Amino acid sequence: MRTRDVLGYSFSAIKLRKLRAGLTTLGVVIGIAAIVALLSITQGLQDTITMQLETGLATDTLIVSPGAGAFGGGQDGGGFGGGALGGADSGFRLLINDTQTINGLSTDILTSTALIQRSGYINSTENERVTTIVGVDFSEYKNIYSTTFISESGEIPDTPDNNMIIIGKRVNERQNGTVLFTAGEDVQILWTNATARPPQNESYTAHVAAVLQEVGGFAFGGPSDNNIYIPITTAQEFFNTSECETIIVKLANSDQATIDAVSKLITNEFAGEVSTISSTAVLNLLGSVFSIIELFLVGIAAISLLVAGIGIMNIMIVSLIERTREIGILKALGMKSRTVLGIFLGESVIIGVIGAVIGIALGWVLANIVATVLSSGAISIGTGGGAGPGGDLLSITPVLTPMVFLGAFGFGVGVSVIFGLYPAWRASKLKPVEALRYE
Amino acid sequence: MALIVEAVDLKKTYMLGKIPVEALRGVNLKIESGDFLAILGPSGSGKSTMLNLIGALDKPTAGTLLIDGVDVSTLNDNQLSDLRRRVGFVFQFFNLIPRLTARDNVELSLSIADIGKAERKKRAEELLETVGLKDRIKHKPAELSGGQQQRVAIARALANNPRFLLLDEPTGNIDSKTAREIMRLVKRLNTEKGVTIIMVTHDQQLAKEAKRTVQMFDGVITSDVVN
C-alpha cells in the first residue's frame, strides 16, 4: 500500500474520533508549548544579559582583585569562589603601584590601571545622590574602555586637575529624565571613613568635568552609569589609602590562551593572593549557568510530554481494541502486517505532528506574551547593581532558534512514535481469523 | 480446466480454551476454475474452517492445501497477505468499513494492491455498477440496506480480479427476496464473467443454485455431487 494511502487511511480513522484525538493532541500541544516557551524565553533572557554584560565588558581585559579563589577565573572554570571576601583574612592588600609589577610580567600585557572604590555622596545645592566613587587614571581608563568611557557633555581630561570628576549617566539623571548635575558645575563629594575612630566624615569641593554617555549593561570593572569617577591621585589622598580594590589589565588580544597565560602569571606573581576574572570567563560561566537552568526547565516540560505520550498509547490501545474487527477485515483483504503497523503508527504520528506544530506556535505566542509582560514593567528586574538609582527594566526578546524549533518538533513526533509503537505492533500481530470473529 | 484449489487429507485443530477441537479431520477436495461450489453443512461441521483455509486466513494443522498450485503451509505472513489479495472474500456480516463510502470501501481493496488513485476510482465505480449500485457510490454502509451492503462487499471482493470468490453465508443476514437477488448476481458473475465461486451455507435451497454441492459433517466431506 502506498504511503500516501496509508496516511490517508490513518487520517480517516482519526477524523472519526475527533474529540478523542483532539484531547490526545492537546496533551502533545501543552508539552511542546511548554518546552518552546521556556526555551525561547530562557534563550532571550540569556541573550539580553549577555548583551548587557558585553556592553560593560571589554573582552581583552582581565580584572585582578585581592583574594584567592576565582570567579570563573581560568579555563578550568571554577565557581564563585572566596573572591574579595576571602582575601581579607590573609592580610594581603592589592596596592595601586602593583600595576607596575603587573605591567612588567608579560609582553601580552599592554597596560594596567588600578581602581579605588568607596560608597559616598555627591551633593549640589539642590540635589544629593548616593553613588560609588571610583578613583581611576582617566587617560588609562579611557584607553582601556575606549568605547564606553566617553563623555556626553563636557570633556574627559587626560591630565585632570585634582578636583575634577566625571559623572555616570544615571547618577546625573533620574529615571524620569530630571538632570541633577551639569558639566562645569561645582559639587560636594562626601565620604564617611568608617575605619577611623570615631568614624570621620570627609568632603571636598569638586568640579564636574564631564557626564558620561549612557553605558547600559552591567558595570563589571568597566565604566558604569551609577558611578562617579575621580582622579586616582585625588582618591588616594581623599580616602587616605595606597590600596586598590581592582586592577584592570589590558591584554594584547582576547585569545583564551593569552587570557589563561596572563591570569596564571599574575596569580603566581601574587602567590595566589589575587584572583583574576576575564570577561570571557564570566560570559562562559553565565552560559553554563543558563544551560543548567534550561536543562532543568526542559526536564519539567518533558515530563508533561511524557504524560502526553502515555495518553497517546492509551488512546491507541483503546482504538486498537475497538477496531479489532476492522483490522481483521483489512488483513482478509490482503493488507500486510507492516501496513497495519503503518496505519496505526501513522495515527500516532499525525497526532504528534499536529500537536508539535500547534505546540510550537502556541509556545512562541506564550513566550512573547510573557516577554511583553516582563518588559512592560509589571515585573522589573534591576540590572543596575551597586548604589545607583533604580535598576533597568529587563527587556527580553524571546528567541526561537532553529535547534529549539526542530528539537521540539522532533521530540513531539518522537514521543508519539515511541508510544504509538506498541499498540501498532499489537494491531499488526492480530490473526485475521480471530480478529474477524471479534465482537 | 485449471485446478485452483486442491486439498489432500486436510486437517485443522484449534484450541477452544484448553480443549483441542478437530474442525477438519482429513478433507480431500479439488476445485476447478469456473466452478460454482456450495459447501453445505450444519454449524460445527467444519465448513467455515474450510473457507478460512481456502481464503488463506488460517493455516492447516496437517495435510496439504494447494491454492493455485502453491502449498499454503509453506507461506510466511507476507506471502499469505499476497495470496489473500487474489481471493475475494464475502462475509455473512458484510464487514464493510463503516466510516467509508461504498466507493471508498471498494477502493480500499484496490489501494491495498497498490493501485493508483485515478484507476482506483474508475474501477470502483465500474464494479459498483456491475453489482447494480451505480447510484449509491457515495453512501456509507449505514445508509445502505443489507442487500446493498452485501453488493458492495461483492464489488470489493471482485476488485482485484480474484482467482475465486469465497462467500460465507452470503444471504444469512438479509431477507429472502434480497437473498434471491444476491444469488442471481452471484450466478451471473459465474456464468457471464467466469468467476469461480465457493460458497458456504447451511441453506439447502441456496446450495441448489450452485453447480456442485459438497456436504460436510463433523469435519469430513460426506457427499460431493454435481447438481
Image (tube, rainbow, N blue to C red):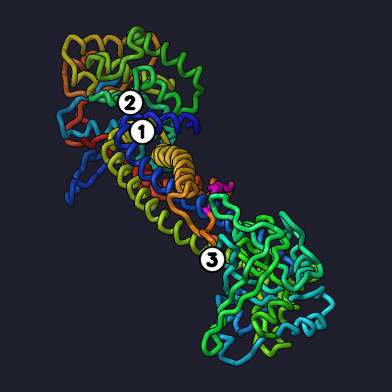
Which quarter of the rendering shows the C terminus of chain A? top left
> Which residues are the magenta region?
A393-401
Whole-number angstrom distance, CA of label 2 to CA of label 3: 66 Å
Q: Chain of mark 1?
A: A
Q: Residue at x 55, y 47 (%)?
A: A397
Circle 1 — which element? helix
Q: Nearer the viewer, residue A17 or B154?
A: A17
Magenta stretch contains residue A272: no
Residue located beneath label 3 in the image: A289
Q: Residue at x 36, y 8 (%)?
A: B134
Taking A255 as reference, is A54 left or right? left
Circle 2 — which element? strand
Residue located beneath label 2 in the image: B89
Q: Chain of mark 2?
A: B
Give residue A191's position: percent from left, percent from top: 58, 76
The residue under label 1 is which amino acid type?
Ile
Give residue A220's position: percent from left, percent from top: 63, 68
Q: Nearer the viewer, residue A124 or A231?
A: A124
